[in-house]
Image: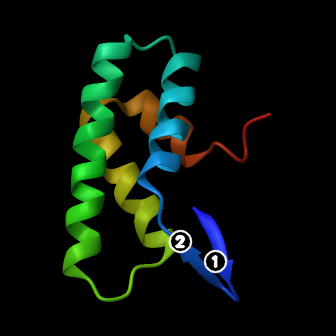
Amino acid sequence: MKKASHNSYSFSAEDIKNDLRREARALRIHTGFAEIIIEKVILKVEAYKKSHPVVTEKDIESLVYSELKKYHKDLAFIYRNREKII
């Protein structure tokens, strides 16, 4: 997410992909498996974005977490708590 203007955010699939790749490497998840998970998550986020006229950053983060939880619970946990972990 990049701040576009007053309380408005610009969605960037590439930013989410990079965040997830970094977290997957930290967990030592195989690169190929991580890429499959990431693509599935991004497809869901893109579909959600197209079907909703207004989408918040929290909506996207929540959706990413929900999708990650289906495929890799540790990665989902790290993603959800990434700003809280020291």
Q: Which residue is drawn at the image coordinates 71% and 47% (left, top)?
A: 83
Residue 15 placement, left or right of 68: right
Residue 23 placement, left or right of 61: right
Rendered view: 31 above or below 11 = above
Secondary structure category for the residue under label 1:
strand
- Image x and y of residue 26, in percent: 59, 18
Q: Quadrant of residue 22?
A: top right
- Image x and y of residue 48, in percent: 24, 69
Q: 59 or 17: which is nearer to us?
A: 17
What numbered label is drawn on residue 10?
Answer: 2
Q: Quadrant of residue 49?
A: bottom left
Secondary structure category for the residue under label 2:
strand
Q: Which residue is drawn at the image coordinates 35% and 23% (left, top)?
A: 34
Rendered view: 4 above or below 68 = below
- Image x and y of residue 73, in percent: 37, 32
Q: Are marks 1 and 2 in contact (CB under 8 Å)?
A: yes
Query: Which residue position holds label 1?
Result: 4
Of callouts 1 and 2, the N-terminal one:
1
- Image x and y of residue 52, in percent: 26, 83
- The residue carrying pointer 2 sits among few (fewer than 14), some (14 to 19) or many (20 or more) residues within 10 Å by Cα, namely few
Q: CA distance from mark 1 to mark 2?
A: 6 Å
Number of numbered discs visible in the structure rendering: 2
User: Considering the image in quadrants, where does the C terminus appear?
Assistant: top right
Q: Mark 1 belongs to which amino acid?
A: Ala
Q: Mark 2 belongs to which amino acid?
A: Ser
